[in-house]
Image (cartoon, helix red, strand yellow):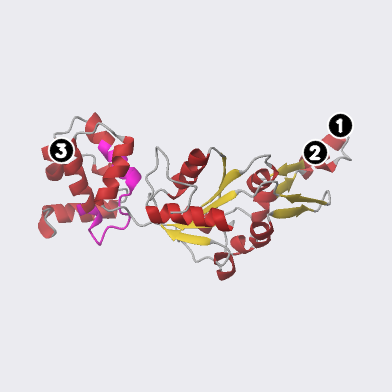
Amino acid sequence: MLNGFTGSSNYVASDDLMNSVNVAMALKKPLLIKGEPGTGKTMLAEAIAESLGLELIIWNIKSTTKAQDGLYVYDTVQRLYDSQFGEGDVADISKYIKLGKMGEAFKSEKQVVLLIDEIDKADLEFPNDLLWELDKMEFYINETKETVKAKHRPIVIITSNAEKELPDAFLRRCIFHYIEFPLAPKMREIVNVHYKDLDKHLLDQAMEAFYWIRSMNEIQKKPSTSELLDWLQALVLGGIDPDQITKQFPFIGTLLKKNQDIDTFESYKRGRGRFR
């Protein structure tokens, strides 16, 4: 394994994932992380920042987000207001330039971790609009004729839920890693990080039920790691007898969030796909 990221106290990472992180850092390329929701893509950036003692800057992407938003915004409305009612010097345009999250990462006096979260939510042109900035680690502010160049190259983590395909030109510039959903042994490690004193019998029964539900092909939104953790907490707080977990499946709404999935589960439970 390359030296660098070795996981954190709150994040269980596979050797392959740690290698991908360290290769991306060594090659100074963005790390593109894909995987189904709940596999810890966003938490990875938090773990990297914690492990390396760096600040984490998060750029949450929405369907309306434009690449420009991450660089800077020129506040023309505030400048117009100040020209009419303010007392300051509106000739100084730099006062009205507000850096976006990528701009903040470039301007930082120390290296940071920059998380571009759920990039596939934006339109198809969004990744291509960032190619220059990710390659050269700089951008140009037209209004002030200034080039902002990264003082320290940030560690860039980009997550995607694979809602849409990303452009080839963008993919070529990234190191790629797909986080597989954890198998039971790895999942136990993850659970133990969050709940160190959990009753073993309760965990055994809950894990058996959890993976049985995930094995149902008809389930549209399979329960994720975060939902398993919530369910375990609900079982403990509810004082549920571990032996009743695989019989009654209490608090099923903690795991399944769609009516159709709950109907599918109830059908299996009634005998079409009998448990065990």
Q: Position of residue 81 (x, y in %)?
A: 81, 37
Q: Position of residue 41 (x, y in %)?
A: 44, 50
Q: Amino acid at mark 2?
A: Lys
Q: Secondary structure at mark 3?
A: helix
Q: Earlier in the sequence, mark 3 or mark 1?
A: 1
Q: Which residue is mark 3?
A: 201
Q: Earlier in the sequence, mark 2 or mark 3?
A: 2
Mark number for residue 95? 2
Q: Position of residue 222 (x, y in %)?
A: 30, 54
Q: Amino acid at mark 3?
A: His
- Quote the CA–CA distance across marks 2 and 3: 61 Å
Q: Is residue 193 magenta?
A: no
Q: Earlier in the sequence, mark 2 or mark 1?
A: 1
Q: Secondary structure at mark 2?
A: helix
**Image check: 230 left or right of 97?**
left
Query: Which region of the structure is painted magenta?
Result: 212-232
